[in-house]
Image (spheres, rainbow, N blue to C red):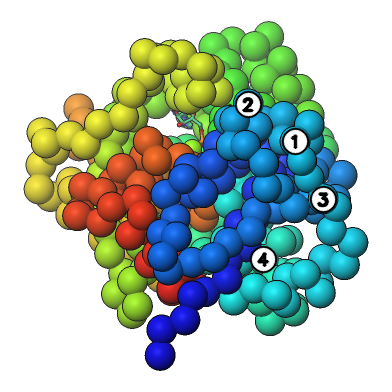
Amino acid sequence: MFFIKKVLILFGGKSTEHYVSCKSCKSIIENIDKKLFEYEVVGIDFDNTWYKFSDDLSYLEKGNWKDANILKIDNIIKYLKEFDVVFPITHGNNGEDGKLQGLLELFNVKFVGCKTLSSSIGMDKVISKVIFDSLNINQVPYLVINEEYSISDIIKKLQFPVIVKPANGGSSIGISKADNKKELIKAIKEAKKYDDKVIIEKFIIARELECAVLENKKDIICSNPGEIKSANEFYDYDAKYVNETSYTTIPNDLKEDVVNKIKDYSKKIFKTLNCSGYARIDFFYDEENEKIYINEINTIPGFTSISMYPKLIESIGITYTDLITILINNA
Ligand SMILES: Nc1ncnc2c1ncn2[C@@H]1O[C@H](COP(=O)(O)OP(=O)(O)O)[C@@H](O)[C@H]1O
Ligand SMILES: [Mg+2]
């Protein structure tokens, strides 16, 4: 018997990617199949308060949804139980790192995307690296620093230029390139604003290729890789969200072998991390040396209708609306 599923779309959260999440949420509301699903929308504020949102979508576009018509939810657990499926589109810390997923799992709420463990591993760039190593997938030389570190050791091990990242983060927030000692010290200080654990990697010149993985019933589908054409020297926050000369494309000049390797690695990573639903897996391709490096996995990838993930899925013949349907039905 056919019944209309009740879906709760969750956005926002205490995350540096809060505003990106507002936009992803807006796209889902605009495109979710209203014949198949009934839905409510909830915004999570920076202080973790949950509010039901039922106002004009322009508030989500601008990010000022707290000014809209909203209603505080007092008993979150009781409220969650009213839904068949939760769709968390909460990018970044607290929403994509397993904490929210843990809450939902604990209370037996079905939800879209990766479960607690795969979400936590995917968010932590250091733990991810350990797993990528175990799968024998190339990574650029890197080192991790906690409280104590020696600048001269870093320089000796990696040599400039390097790129410095908070271990947990996203949207390139807190990430900077360093060409010399002074810039390195500044970059570490910047990354430490977001996480005590910091990764320093050799900065490489390479093409940035991304693969969309989608679970449909028991099948794991991998798209051909998409490519980032960054407006800046690397795909920093400005290049991702501000500078309109950045663009994404699905290249047709990649050797079949490269495409297949990227798809194989992506599937392997998705399975090893025990992912569910979807993930976007990002690589570097050093064309000159014909070397592929894994960069990272995103378990709640950018999800506006023009984001890379939906675009890649569209390239394999699944529309954005059908993608949302598959994800909800697979939860
Ligand atoms: N080792 C590297 N060499 C060159 N550029 C890099 C390297 N690591 C990251 N970048 C650039 O920085 C961007 C953001 O880094 P990433 O690790 O993907 O963090 P985030 O989780 O914030 O997306 C990448 O998209 C890429 O443009
Ligand atoms: Mg990235």
Question: Where is mark 3, residue-wise?
Answer: 71
Q: Please tell me which of labels 3 and 2 falls first in the chain.
A: 2
Which mark is drawn over residue 68?
A: 1
Question: Where is mark 2, residue-wise?
Answer: 62
Q: State if disc 1 and disc 2 touch (CB < 8 Å).
A: no
SS class of the residue under badge 4? helix
Q: Position of residue 241 (x, y in %)?
A: 51, 23
User: Which of labels 3 and 2 is toward the front?
Assistant: 3
Q: State if disc 1 and disc 3 touch (CB < 8 Å).
A: no
**Residue 275 higher or lower than 202, as above or below:** below
As shown in the figure, which amino acid type bears the numbered disc 2? Answer: Lys
Q: Position of residue 34 (x, y in %)?
A: 45, 60
Tell me how far mark 4 sits from mark 2, CA to CA: 27 Å
Label 3: few (<14), some or many (≥20) within 10 Å? some
Q: Position of residue 178 (x, y in %)?
A: 57, 16
What residue do we see at 65% from left, 11% from top? Answer: 183
Q: Is residue 284 left or right of residue 118?
A: left
Tell me how far mark 3 sits from mark 2, CA to CA: 19 Å
